Image (spheres, grey):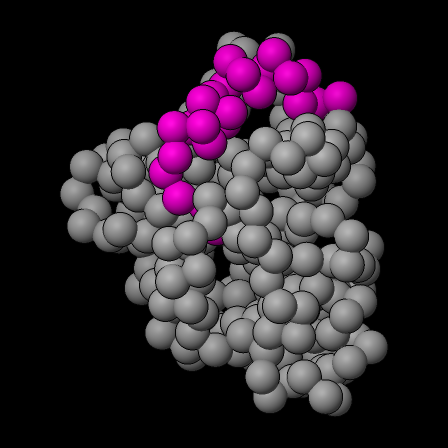
Amino acid sequence: MIFSNIEEYLNITKKDTIIFCVANIGILNMLENFIISCSNNNIDIVLFTLDKEITTIINKKYKIDIIQYGDEFCSILKNDFNVTVDLNNYIQYNTHNFRYISFARFFIINKILKRNINIIYSDIDIVVKKNFTEEIKNIATMHECIFQFNGENCVTGFFAMKPTQKLIIFLEVNNLKRLNIFKYIHDQQFWNNVAYDNNLFNIYFLNRDHYPNGNHYYKHHKNIKDECRLIHFNCLIGENNKINKMKELNEWFI
């Protein structure tokens, strides 16, 4: 089902936890692979789309809830940050425009948390191997935030948050503006430098064998492939490199 904005969806959902991703047409192939892996493991994913073309394509092929977020996101960028971004092309990691796209998740999360709903966020360069929903929800009963771990700090490509007042205030648009978020290369650098390094929240790190990031999985996949809940194909630059690695490791379903 297609929703014209996030409020329309939040007004009718009965979920206590929303699992979501964000995408534009530039990453359609990886998005489809991600959606298929979610479906194969009974993960009910919600997609926030940043352009109308990807909304139309995904709605025709998959039975998932889609929230059209592009206009609202562009409005936030323009009105609060004086930024204009083209959402209709692939935006490569670590490029200037990527920093803007990467922060969309925080604006979305703030609105969901305000409705007293938990979130689980996932990048679309992830392949789901097992249903992780209940495991993450159980961990969240004792922790404010749950993050994938890269051996040093938080990976913001897969994480969960519960609706605490402290998190809601931190993720308000005005506070993110005050913190000058776009001086950071991307959301992960911002989160680690501002939130993690300053111990602002109670953060739990996921087991790396169960929730491996790219380098950990590439190195140890023969030993952990049967126990991991997901594989995050990060630590590679460029969509084609990620897709080729997924194909090499037999994790490409299109």
Q: Is residue 162 magenta?
A: yes
Q: In the picture, residue 42 is in which quadrant? A: bottom left
Front residue of this view, candidates 144 and 3: 144
In the rendered picture of this protein, how many numbered marks are placed on residues?
0
User: Residue at left 54%, top 42%?
Assistant: 202
User: Residue at left 68%, top 30%?
Assistant: 198
Above or below, 50 against 241 in this view is: above
Residue 90, image x, y percentages: 68, 46
Chief SS of the magenta region: helix
Q: Is residue 55 visible?
A: no
Front residue of this view, candidates 50 and 20: 20
Q: Is residue 11 magenta?
A: no
Q: Is residue 217 visible?
A: yes
In the shown orientation, is residue 158 left or right of residue 143? right
Residue 148, image x, y percentages: 62, 57
Specify start and end residues of the magenta stretch as a single range: 160-183
Front residue of this view, candidates 86 and 180: 180
Q: Quadrant of the C terminus?
A: bottom right
User: Residue at left 47%, top 66%?
Assistant: 35
User: Residue at left 56%, top 53%?
Assistant: 204
In the shown orientation, is residue 21 left or right of residue 244? left
Q: In the picture, residue 214 is in which quadrant? A: bottom right
